[in-house]
Image (tube, grey):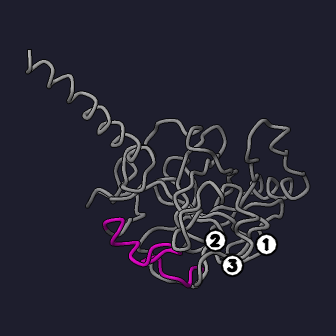
Amino acid sequence: MKAISILSIGALAGIIAGCLNTEHSASATGERYPWKKNIVTTVFWIGEQPSRNNPVPNRISAWDKNWSRSYGGFDDPNPAHRSNYIPVKFTPRQNPFYCALPYNDKSANGHRPEAPRVVPWYKEAYQGLGVSTCKDRWVAIRNGTRTVYAQWEDAGPFRTDYWQYVFGSERPKLNLNKGAGLDVSPAVRDYLGLNETDVTDWRFVEFSEVPRGPWSTLGENNTFVISDRKTGRELAEASKPAEGRAIAR
C-alpha cells in the first residue's frame, strides 16, 4: 500500500450508503456469502517494501514465510513493467490474482480459538493444526459492471483478527488508509481499472461459482491449475488400458 489517493465524492457517498444500509442476507440473495459493499480498497504487492501506510514488508505473508520466493519474484506494480496481468520479467509460480483480508485463522499453536465457530467452511477445509483454512479461498471483487476473482493469500490491511467484519456484518474500522478493508494485487487492480485507493464490493465464493478467466491460468496454488492437472492425469491413466488392449490385438 502506497500513498493514499483522494477518493471521489461519488465513492465517499457510496461508503456512507454502505454504512447506512444493511447487507442483504445470503438467504435473501440466494448466495451463501453476501456481498460486502462499498469497501475502501487499496493495492499491495508481493515484494512491497515497508512504508508509513504499510509498516510490514510483503516478502512474507501471514501463511508463507517465503512468499516472494514462492511467487517467483517481485510483483512489480508499475503498469509499464507489466503485460497480460503479470510482470514482464518472469511468469509467477502462484496466482497473480490475489488479495488480503484482515483476518488470520492461524495462531502460534494451531488455529485461533474462534476460528472453528466463525470461519464458515472451517470443518470442510480443516487439514490439521499447521494448515490455514483461509489461504487460497476464492473471493469475487466487483467494481461497476466488472467482476474479478482472486485468491485470499494474506491477512490485512493493518489487522489480522477482525473476523466480525470478514465473516460478520461489521464495517471496516478507520485506519491509516481511510478505513481500507481489502487489499488487492496489481492484476486485480488492472482488471478492474482501480485507482491506488478505490472502492469495491467483495464476497466469498465457492470454487464452483468461479468462471474461467485470466485468474484461472497460472499458479501452483491455483485451484483451476490443480484441477486441470488432476483431470489430465486421470485421463492419461484411463487411456492406458485401452492402449494396452489395442497392442494386445
**How many residues crowd mark 1 within 10 Å: few (<14), some (14–19), many (20+)?**
few
Of the 4 image quadrants, the one containing the N terminus is bottom right
In the rendered image of this protein, does residue 122 appear above or below residue 49? above
Q: Residue furthest front?
A: 248
Is label 1 or label 3 in front?
A: 1
Q: Main secondary structure of the magenta part?
A: loop
**Mark closer to the chain start, 1 or 2:** 2
Image position, residue 85 (x, y; %): 40, 50
| Residue 226 image position (x, y, % from top left) | 39, 47
Q: Position of residue 106 (x, y in %)?
A: 60, 75
The amino acid marked with disc number 3 is Leu
Q: Are marks 1 and 2 in contact (CB under 8 Å)?
A: no
- Tell me the element at label 2: loop
**Snapshot quadrant of residue 176:** bottom right
The magenta-colored residue range is 53-72
The residue under the point 64% across, 37% down is 145
Q: Secondary structure at mark 3?
A: loop
Question: Left or right: 131 with respect to 246?
Answer: right
Amino acid on which the number 1 mark rests in the picture: Lys
Give me the C-alpha separation between circle 1 and circle 3: 10 Å
Q: Secondary structure at mark 1?
A: loop
Residue at numbered disc 2 = 105
- Which residue is under mark 3? 176
Q: Residue at x 8, y 20 (%)?
A: 248
On screen, residue 129 above or below 118: below
Q: Nearer the viewer, residue 127 or 207?
A: 127
Q: Mark 1 — residue?
A: 173
Mark 2 or 3, nearer chain start: 2
Q: Is residue 58 magenta?
A: yes
Give the alpha-carbon distance from disc 2 to disc 3, as whole Å.
Answer: 23 Å
Taking the image as shown, residue 135 lies to the left or right of residue 178, namely left
